[in-house]
Image: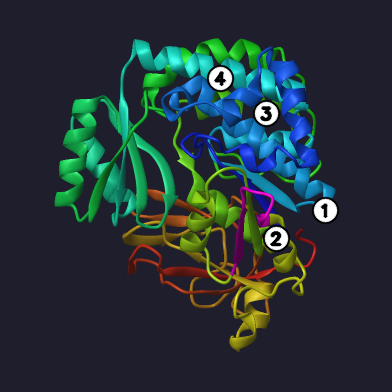
């Protein structure tokens, strides 16, 4: 299954629209300019990085170029089985899914960028990437900093972004190194996005969201806030509002998309960050980034392969296992406590069923399977329990297998 992912703020670069000027899909820019009430071709072709880095400009430029790329891919006759977007990219994903009209998507991105820019001025902050650190250690560093700093993005295993006031982020970064982070990288942004410091933006965006018309997505869209699929259009205004002050659960979203059957992840828009995160977070998946017209040929080469054939899949004896089965892994280290309403660890049988051959439990995406310490573990996959991979009371490490599932045939 093809999965389309859309990048967020930070992927923009000066002149990023130039390769698309002679492509038929560049007409999307004129349509977006009419909806936004400003000339966006200048922003995509001529704006220097200083101008393009401003929050309002960065978000609008990234959103519009992503939709130019989407239009070009759709002209090839390709469509996804599911999609998601990182932060701002969630608006691109909703337009791609039909949940939000193009014009209303443009209007909301304009409002969002302006609101977040103002919030960044009223409550100044910054962000930093922590590399080589577990999620729970990143959270602990923020808590021990005793200031306004929080985890803002769960991007990939060993890659977490924190955000808050400059002093608190600096302190949390120092503590993160003590807890094992290999590197702390400052991110040049004008605000502490996806933290409570964006509360002012949330209040002003909420009205615009309430005035917009959302529709049931034609394909599954996985939300940043909870890494779950939402098909009720009434839920999306609240999800987009909450997203401003909540962490982006991107790693968990990728796992959900893989659980839905995603084997080819296509990033549409500037940069290639999301493709790298997918390769780091998931095993045996194909990734391709489409940022320029020349990348369309690479995409067609990828989709021309037999469906389900990830890179070097023919070298893996377990290819059939990969296609039909999934493993739920631990999000961190600690003592594992399985959910007692599911199959008993080590047997694959429901509690209270002693006879061999009793039916395995069936679980849906998002179901609670247990806890590691105090952290809930919810499955990104739907299927039937084959076997528990960890016993009740066992100490597990981050990434350790907990549950082995057979994907249900009716799942998309």
The label nearer to you, 2 versus 4, is 2
Residue 105 drawn at (x, y percent):
70, 25
Q: CA distance from mark 4 to mark 3?
A: 18 Å
Q: Up-down: is 312 above or below 379?
A: below
Whichever of labels 1 and 4 marks the residue nearer the N terminus, that label is 1
Report the residue at 53% width, 58% height from top: 278
Q: Is residue 214 visible?
A: no
The label nearer to you, 2 versus 3, is 2
The residue that disc 2 covers is 299
Is 50 in front, or is 21? Answer: 21
Say which element carries label 4: helix
Report the residue at 59% width, 31% height from top: 45
Residue 16 drawn at (x, y percent):
57, 38
Report the residue at 68% width, 22% height from top: 106
The residue that disc 3 covers is 235
The quarter of the rendered structure image containing the C terminus is: bottom right
The residue that disc 4 covers is 112
Q: Up-down: is 375 above or below 54?
A: below
Residue 352 falls inside the magenta stretch: no
Residue 354 drawn at (x, y percent):
59, 78
**Rendering quarter of residue 213:** top right
Task: Give, as a single range, the part of the protein colored magenta.
Answer: 285-295
Disc 1 crowd, CA 10 A, few/some/many (<14, 14-19, 20+): few
Q: Which mark is residue 76?
A: 1
The quarter of the rendered structure image containing the N terminus is: bottom right
Q: Contact (CB < 8 A) between labels 1 and 2? A: yes
Whichever of labels 2 and 4 marks the residue nearer the N terminus, that label is 4
Q: Up-down: is 404 above or below 213?
A: below
Residue 369 drawn at (x, y percent):
52, 57
Q: Contact (CB < 8 A) between labels 3 and 1? A: no
Is 168 in front, or is 300? Answer: 300
Whichever of labels 1 and 2 marks the residue nearer the N terminus, that label is 1
């Amino acid at each position: 299954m093809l999965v389309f992912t859309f990048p967020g703020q930070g992927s923009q670069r000066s002149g990023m629209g130039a390769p698309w000027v002679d492509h038929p899909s560049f007409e999307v820019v004129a349509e977006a300019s009419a909806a936004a009430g400003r000339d966006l071709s200048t922003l995509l072709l001529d704006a220097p990085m200083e101008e393009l880095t401003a929050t309002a400009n960065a978000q609008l430029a990234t959103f519009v170029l992503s939709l130019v790329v989407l239009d070009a891919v759709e002209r090839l006759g390709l469509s996804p089985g599911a999609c998601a977007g990182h932060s701002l990219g969630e608006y691109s994903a909703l337009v791609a899914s039909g949940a939000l009209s193009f014009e209303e998507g443009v209007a909301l991105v304009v409002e969002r960028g302006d609101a977040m820019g103002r919030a960044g001025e009223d409550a100044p902050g910054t962000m930093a990437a922590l590399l080589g650190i577990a999620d729970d250690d990143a959270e602990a560093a923020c808590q021990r900093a005793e200031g306004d700093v929080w985890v803002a993005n769960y991007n990939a295993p060993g890659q977490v972004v924190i955000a808050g006031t400059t002093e608190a982020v600096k302190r949390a970064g120092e503590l993160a190194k003590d807890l094992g982070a290999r590197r702390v990288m400052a991110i040049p942004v004008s605000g502490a996005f996806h933290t409570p410091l964006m509360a002012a933006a949330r209040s002003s965006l909420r009205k615009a969201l309430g005035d917009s018309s959302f529709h049931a997505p034609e394909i599954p869209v996985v939300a940043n806030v909870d890494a779950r699929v939402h098909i009720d259009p009434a839920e999306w205004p609240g999800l987009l509002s909450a997203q401003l002050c909540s962490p982006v659960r991107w790693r968990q979203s990728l796992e959900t998309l893989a659980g839905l059957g995603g084997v080819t992840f296509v990033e549409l828009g500037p940069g290639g960050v999301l493709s790298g995160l997918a390769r780091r977070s998931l095993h045996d998946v194909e990734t391709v980034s489409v940022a320029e017209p020349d990348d369309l040929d690479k995409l067609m080469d990828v989709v021309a392969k037999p469906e389900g054939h990830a890179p070097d899949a023919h070298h893996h004896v377990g290819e059939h296992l990969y296609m039909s089965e999934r493993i739920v892994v631990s999000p961190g280290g600690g003592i594992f406590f399985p959910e007692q309403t599911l199959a008993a660890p080590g047997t694959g049988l429901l509690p209270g069923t002693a006879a061999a051959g009793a039916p395995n439990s069936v679980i849906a995406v998002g179901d609670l399977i247990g806890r590691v310490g105090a952290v809930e573990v919810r499955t990104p996959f739907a299927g039937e329990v084959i076997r528990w991979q960890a016993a009740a009371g066992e100490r597990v490490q981050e990434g350790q297998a907990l549950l082995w599932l057979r994907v249900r045939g009716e799942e998309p």
